[in-house]
Amino acid sequence: MSAQETYENVEKSLQERGQSHLLAFWEQLDADRRLDLLAQIQRLDLTKIDQWMADLVKKPTFTPNCANFTPATSYSPDPAGPEQQGKYAKAIELGRELISTGKVAAFVVAGGQGIRLGFDGPKGNFHISPVRNRTLFQIFADSIAAVSRKYRTVCPWYVMTSRLNYDRTVEIFRSNDYYGLDEKNVFFFQQGTLPNLDPDGRILLADKNTIACSPDGHGGSLKALHQSGAIEDMKNRGVEFLSYFQVDNALINIFDPLFIGLHVLDNAEMSSKAVIKTRPKEKVGNFCLIDGKVNVIEYSDLPDELAERRNSDQSLVFQFGSIAIHIINRTFVERLNAGDFALPLHRAVKKIHHIDDQGNSVESDGIKLESFVFDALPLASNSVILQTRRSEEFAPTKNRTGVDSVETTRQMITNRAADWLEWAGVTVPRKSDGSVDCLLEIAPSFALEKEDIREKLSQIPEIKLGDSIYLA
């Protein structure tokens, strides 16, 4: 087909769908830019975009079928009774065995930029730790290295970036010598993108020959794993399970034997960790059951009446919040990608940079579409939820100050270190209100869990008021 025939076919298809404005600046483009624009348009699934317009643009709100779902149940962080204690012990033993035989890999979703933190660059390169000022990437790498040493194995690391920060992320790892990890055990790949729309459903242009796109959300990771070759790499290595987490959580316990073991013992395909919500409308997803399958309802979609509903002991009925920590079977990802797989899309109204009909650069409200990884949960044959303690594993770094911020994360790193030390019998200075009166940081090379502290008591100096202590 000639270039002119291709143009005519594309033009006709766009006109039929009210998207012909994508070619508005055709006469102003040189041959190469024309070919580039045509290629972008041909990659669009215009039939699906029509459906998105009907389902997401024209229907701006989602109302869940409240009568159809019930609160989810979870495993407690502490086993109750001899039977559960026995199961937890078996799960821990199994989890350790799977880690030591190289069956578990780390998988971080790292497409975010540090804009809300006042930082120019990939969020993973933000310096966050309270004493040594280590970056998020460094903290994760240190954990992976420590686990690899402890279990005498290789724990590969899969890092999904956005198209925007892929090159910079790879450069950061190279310039830091992969933080001591072997380069061949770190696999980078990019998530996909989806076009941005205006409130009427028209596809926006970033410039005269470029469609405005945004990352397709963390749910796109399941397709990107397949398309990038990451799944094939896992098969070659013998990896069977992925430990999924997001780049902004500095307290993540990447390789948790209990979590891994419970997941496998219960024949789950995708499992999750949860925390007890601090308030009814906390900005976390809500775990629930729909027809016996685990689902997550976003905080913005849970009706206030249900969010506020309480049990007789005054605990929230929908009390379990999703913290974006999952164990995912490699075979589950393969199964999902065997056909025309796509998770449901969600809409977000945000300010979007684009050009107007005159070609001027503007910023206005538009619609970004994204998928959420937790929407794969009901597709799993079985799913486990393990409740964990927020203070142990969940410190999201989303803002510069205030809630879920740089400030709170640094304090939580110190607080967890203090709790571990005190559990092992070390005296930690505290203020009259009970808060820790020093800065503490424990490297994974020193302790991956609090039980490791007792073996190294002789290496811990006396901790005084106002000290900054780094244990490694």
Image: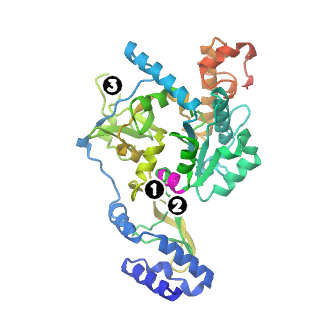
Asked whether disc 3 touches disc 1, contact meaning CB atoms under 8 Å apart, the reply is no
Q: What residue type is labelled 2?
A: Ser
Q: In this view, does 275 lie above or below 186?
A: above
Q: CB of mark 3 within 8 Å of CB of mark 2?
A: no
Give the image location of residue 84, x and y in percent: 39, 18
Nearer to us: label 3 or label 1: 1
Amino acid found under the numbered disc labelled 3: Gln
**Pointer 1: residues within 10 angstroms few (<14), some, or many (20+)?**
many
Q: Is residue 339 magenta?
A: no
Q: What's the distance in space between the residues labelled 2 and 1, CA to CA?
A: 8 Å
Question: Mark 2 and 1 residues: CB-CB less than 8 Å, in contact?
Answer: yes
Can you say which quadrant of the picture contains the C terminus? top right
Between the residue at mark 3 and the residue at mark 2, the CA separation in whole angstroms equals 42 Å
Q: Nearer the viewer, mark 3 or mark 2?
A: 2
- Label 2 element class: strand
Residue kind at label 1, given as amino acid type: Glu
Residue indicated by mark 2 = 214
Which label number is shown at residue 370? 1
Graded by Cα atoms within 10 Å as few (under 14), some (14 to 19) or many (20 or more), the crowding at tag 2 reads some
In the image, residue 223 lies in the stretch drawn in magenta: yes
Provide the residue span drawn in magenta: 222-227
Tell me: 436 left or right of 37: right
- Which residue carries the number 3 mark? 314
Q: 416 or 379, which lies in front?
A: 379
